[in-house]
Image (cartoon, helix red, strand yellow):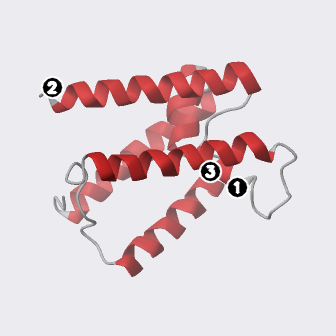
Amino acid sequence: MPSSWLFALAGGAMIGGAAALLLLTHGRIAGISGVLGSLLPPGAAPDRGWRLAFIGGLLAAGLIGAAVAPTAVGASVRTLPVVIVAGLIVGFGTRLGSGCTSGHGVCGLSRLSPRSMVAVATFMTTGAITAMIAGGVS
């Protein structure tokens, strides 16, 4: 069985390829918060088709991954209410930062966007500090 770094490399290549394909075919950035945010409220986006397909693909990949390798990710180490609150905080942060990790980290950095470079440096630093404060929760 291949090493876990090989799976990570393949996953990263697929994410980069999908982001490039979306940019080339639709002229759009593969930032999840922007893709999903434009679907809310319903009818807000005139280009709903590709957005729904994109989100559907994310959901399908998660379901397929859970079926094929259920122990690869594992269960959440936090309760559902904590996960919900964390998700809401992340959603607030993506609005505050004008994008999410996928939009800034994958797409923005590859386009050498100065705004994305600052955003990535900020959320990586904040994430590292948070992980140190949390004390090695895995």
In the foreground, 2 or 84: 2
In the image: residue 66, left or right of residue 19:
left
Q: Secondary structure at mark 2?
A: loop
Kind of residue sitting beneath label 3: Ser
- Measure the C-alpha gap from mark 2 to mark 1: 37 Å
Kind of residue sitting beneath label 1: Gly
On residue 25, the disc is: none
On residue 33, the disc is: 3
In the foreground, 122 or 72: 72
Count of numbered badges drawn on the protein:
3
In the image: residue 59, left or right of residue 115:
left
Q: Residue at x 61, y 27 (%)?
A: 114
Q: Nearer the viewer, mark 3 or mark 2?
A: 2
- Measure the C-alpha gap from mark 3 to mark 2: 32 Å
Of labels 2 and 1, earlier in sequence is 2
Residue 63 is situated, as x and y percent measured from the top left of the image, at: 41, 53
Tell me if residue 75 can be seen: yes
Residue 94 is situated, as x and y percent measured from the top left of the image, at: 59, 54
Of labels 3 and 2, earlier in sequence is 2
In the foreground, 134 or 110: 110
Q: Residue at x 70, y 44 (%)?
A: 51
Residue 48 is situated, as x and y percent measured from the top left of the image, at: 79, 47
Q: Residue at x 68, y 24 (%)?
A: 23
Image quadrant holding the N terminus, namely top left
Mark 3 near mark 1, Cβ–Cβ under 8 Å? yes
Q: Residue at x 26, y 30 (%)?
A: 7
On residue 2, the disc is: 2
On residue 37, the disc is: 1
